[in-house]
Image (spheres, grey):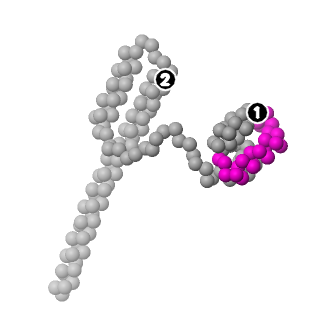
């Protein structure tokens, strides 16, 4: 069930024409020709009308996330404790502060899980390397046995 007013035939035709001219959802929204419609409403109606939106560029609010150095467990614990102490010291706290602290604590919890999994993965890698060396040594000794016979 829709929550807004019904789409008129004129609005549908206008949207289809704009989409055929290569305009994306954001461009249609920014044009102001459908000023009483939200971006999400335009996007949903384009999907209902069967317009292919797969080639459109997605909008990301954050910058590109790049590879970073793995922070040690001690550093994460220190940051976690620092955030906890700051919460305890606050007498007045805004919603933004609470959300920021919630994100920090959630990230720390997930980080601990990932960190320990990474440690186990590194241990497995070391074991695999040792096994590969042993296999190479066994293959070399087998070759020498065969050549001596």
Asked where in the image residue 43 lies, by quadrant, the reply is: top right
Quadrant where the C terminus is found in the figure:
bottom left
Q: Residue at x 82, y 40 (%)?
A: 8
Residue 142: image location, x then y, percent: 22, 78
Residue in the foreground of this view, choosing between 1 and 29: 29
Residue at image coords 63%, 42%: 26
In the rendered image, residue 79, in percent from the top left (x then y), is placed at 33, 29
Residue placed at 28% from the left, 34% from the top? 74
Callout 2 secondary element: helix
Residue that badge 2 annotates: 96
Q: How many marks?
A: 2
Would you identify the image quadrant in which residue 2 lies? Answer: top right
Range covered by the magenta-colored residues: 1-24
Q: Which mark is residue 4?
A: 1
- Residue 3, above or below 138: above
| Residue 100 at x, y percent in the picture | 45, 27
Q: Residues within 10 Å of mark 2 (few under 14, many from 20)?
A: few
* Residue beneath the point at 42% across and 38% down: 110
User: What SS does tag 1 mark?
Assistant: loop
**Picture layout, residue 94 above or below residue 112:** above
Per the model, the C-alpha gap separating discs 1 and 2 is: 31 Å
Is 71 magenta? The answer is no
Query: Neighbour class for label 1 at 10 Å: few (<14), some, many (≥20)?
Result: few
Does residue 73 appear to the left or right of 9 in the view shown? Answer: left
Query: Residue 57: which disc?
Result: none
- Whether residue 7 is visible to the viewer of this picture, yes or no, is yes
60 sits to left or right of 3: left
* Residue 138: percent from left, percent from top: 23, 72
Q: Is residue 40 visible?
A: no
Q: Are marks 1 and 2 in contact (CB under 8 Å)?
A: no
């Amino acid at each position: 069930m829709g929550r807004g007013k019904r789409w008129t035939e004129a609005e549908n035709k206008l949207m289809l024409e704009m989409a055929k001219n290569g305009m994306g959802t954001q461009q249609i929204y920014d044009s102001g020709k459908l000023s009483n419609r939200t971006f999400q409403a335009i996007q949903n109606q384009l999907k209902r009308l069967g317009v292919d939106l797969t080639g459109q560029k997605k909008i990301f609010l954050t910058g590109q996330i790049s590879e970073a150095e793995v922070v040690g467990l001690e550093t994460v614990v220190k940051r976690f404790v620092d955030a906890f102490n700051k919460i305890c010291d606050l007498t007045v706290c805004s919603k933004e502060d609470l959300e920021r602290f919630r994100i920090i604590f959630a990230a720390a919890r997930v980080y601990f899980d990932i960190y320990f999994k990474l440690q186990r993965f590194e241990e497995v890698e070391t074991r695999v390397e040792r096994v590969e060396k042993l296999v190479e040594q066994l293959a070399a000794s087998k070759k020498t046995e065969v050549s001596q016979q």
